[in-house]
Amino acid sequence: MDILGAGLILAARATPHDLSIFHPESPAGSAIANLSILVLVITSGILLIVGGVLMYCVLRFRTTSVDGIEPPQVYGSIPIEVAWTAAPAMIVFILILVTTRTLWEVEIPKPSSTPGDDALFVTVVGRQWWWEYQYEQYNGKELAFVTANELHMPVSESGRPRRVHLTLKSDDVCHSFWVPRLGGKTDLIPGRVSTMWLQTERPGLYLGQCAEFCGEQHANMLLRVVAESPDAFDAWLEKEAASAKTTSTEAVAQGRELFQKLSCVNCHSVRGTSADGTNGPDLTHVMRRATLASGQIVNSPENLRSWIADPQKIKRGSLMPNFGLSQLQLDHIMAYLESLD
Ligand code: CUA
């Protein structure tokens, strides 16, 4: 088993289905969780005090008036009015201060890539309904490859942070990048560029979800972040940056030819071949991804085959049409795609 395999097993042992902001695994996530707890404590206190006084008054002073005479009314008590104006103003002021401090902790400016900085720079493009990741630099070195739906990042060690600086853009409508345990939501807005950063010391798989309604399949625009040891990440990077394999069997060659002929190439890229479409996910190493259709289904041969046979059955509204392929054509395309690892 190679390093990547070990990394994936480690990732599977973590608790990927935990989407709670109260179990943060990053500095930004912790800052947000702390602020949320403080706000919850303060607002729960207010709820208890106001609700308690209200209930007390309702019970203590309820009266069954038979003579129609109202109890004495109280107007213009200055101490009471000062108290209920000053106390909320103080609370709001405290919340403004801690929120501002959290904003400073969460929004650090994006530096430029320099050798030895251990930082990874990735541009995330939101698409209906999947994520494109353009790997740009790592540790000052230029990377120039594109992948989809599964973001791999190296973990930090104490005293040696390995930050991931994300530049977020949208290709169509508004989306929102949200991996709850790694930080807050950041919107991807057409015509604008947003930034955020990730950092974690704990290897594992972190799940997330597009958090801005973006159309029919918004709920199936899932996020997967694989945080792995620097060695495992380096191994992943090296394989991912390589072009598609050129050695092939007869079946693979037939599949490749069909792939080029059937207009798959208008939307998909396979580095090292003439396929350079950019509307759909890059397929250079598609078999190395654990899922298909933005985390919706497991990347197994059966699922991949039914996806190609009719994507609309799995993700209705997806931009990939049903090409009406014959079983033989499907066999060939599958042979080709399965060679892309
Ligand atoms: Cu993308 Cu919701």
Image (cartoon, rainbow, N blue to C red):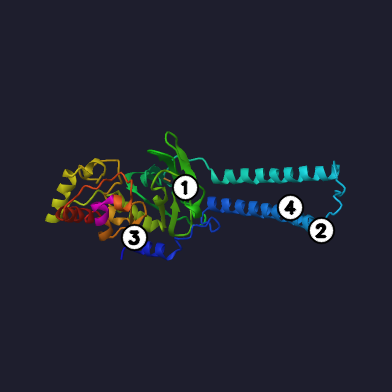
Whether the residues at callouts 4 and 2 have beta carbons within 8 Å, the answer is no
Residue kind at label 4, given as amino acid type: Val
Mark 1 Cβ inside 8 Å of ligand 1: yes
Is residue 194 placed above or below 224 in the rendered structure?
above
Comparing labels 1 and 3, the label whose residue is closer to the camera: 1
Among numbered discs 1 and 3, the one appearing first in the sequence? 3
Q: Quadrant of ligand 1?
A: top left
Disc 2 marks which residue?
Answer: 60
Q: Secondary structure at mark 4?
A: helix
Residue 165 picture quarter: top left
Residue pictured at 13% horizontal, 51% vertical: 254
The label on residue 211 is 1
Disc 3 marks which residue?
Answer: 4
Give the residue furthest to the front: 67
Among numbered discs 3 and 2, the one appearing first in the sequence? 3
Give the class, few, some or many, for how many residues have Cα within 10 Å of label 4's Cα (few <14, many ≥20).
Answer: few
Residue 59 picture quarter: bottom right
Residue kind at label 2, given as amino acid type: Arg
The segment highlighted magenta reads 305-311
Residue pictured at 47% horizontal, 52% vertical: 179
Residue 16 at x, y percent in the picture: 44, 60
Q: Main secondary structure of the magenta part?
A: helix
